[in-house]
Amino acid sequence: MAISSNRLIGLTEELQIEQSCQVQDLHIGWHNEYQAQHQKDPAGHQHRAPVVTWQRHGITYQYVPGLVFVAQDQGYEVDVAQLISDISQQLRARGNPQPHAA
């Protein structure tokens, strides 16, 4: 069965995310590296999630986001806006010290 692995987030968007989340060396890669990247839409079709790698304060972080799907005329496709939102949320949270309650 074929796996959909189109680059859903372009390099320009990747740079905008990097700048807005204040991280360094953001890379949203679509190569097949981890089993967690293989995700199925509600119809059972395989999609490949990206591997997101970035640095903050000299430490490298990496994760594979869960894909959210939206119904279309021809089946399901990845909700790109949700993917960008999920990636941005993760970038802001990991490696960023949280204020402590007094």
Image (cartoon, grey):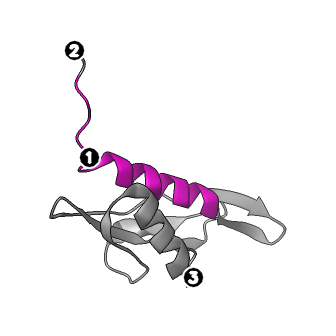
The answer to whether residue 27 of the structure is visible from this angle is: yes
Residue pointed to by mark 3: 6
**Residue at 43% over, 72% down:** 50
Amino acid type shown at disc 3: Asn
Q: Nearer the viewer, residue 72 or 40?
A: 72
Q: Secondary structure under badge 1?
A: loop
**Residue at 36% over, 55% down:** 91
The N terminus: image quadrant: bottom right
**Which numbered tag is attached to residue 96?**
1
Residue pointed to by mark 2: 102
Label located before the other in sequence (3 or 2): 3
The answer to whether residue 10 of the structure is visible from this angle is: no
Q: Nearer the viewer, mark 1 or mark 3?
A: 1
Q: Which contiguous range is marked in magenta?
A: 79-100
Q: Are marks 1 and 3 in contact (CB under 8 Å)?
A: no
Q: Quadrant of residue 78?
A: bottom right
The C terminus: image quadrant: top left
Q: Is residue 98 left or right of residue 35?
A: left
Amino acid type shown at disc 1: Asn
**Residue at 80% over, 72% down:** 74
As measured in the structure, the alpha-carbon distance from the residue carrying label 1 to the one carrying label 3 is: 30 Å
**Residue at 43% over, 80% down:** 30
Q: Magenta segment: does it hold 66? A: no
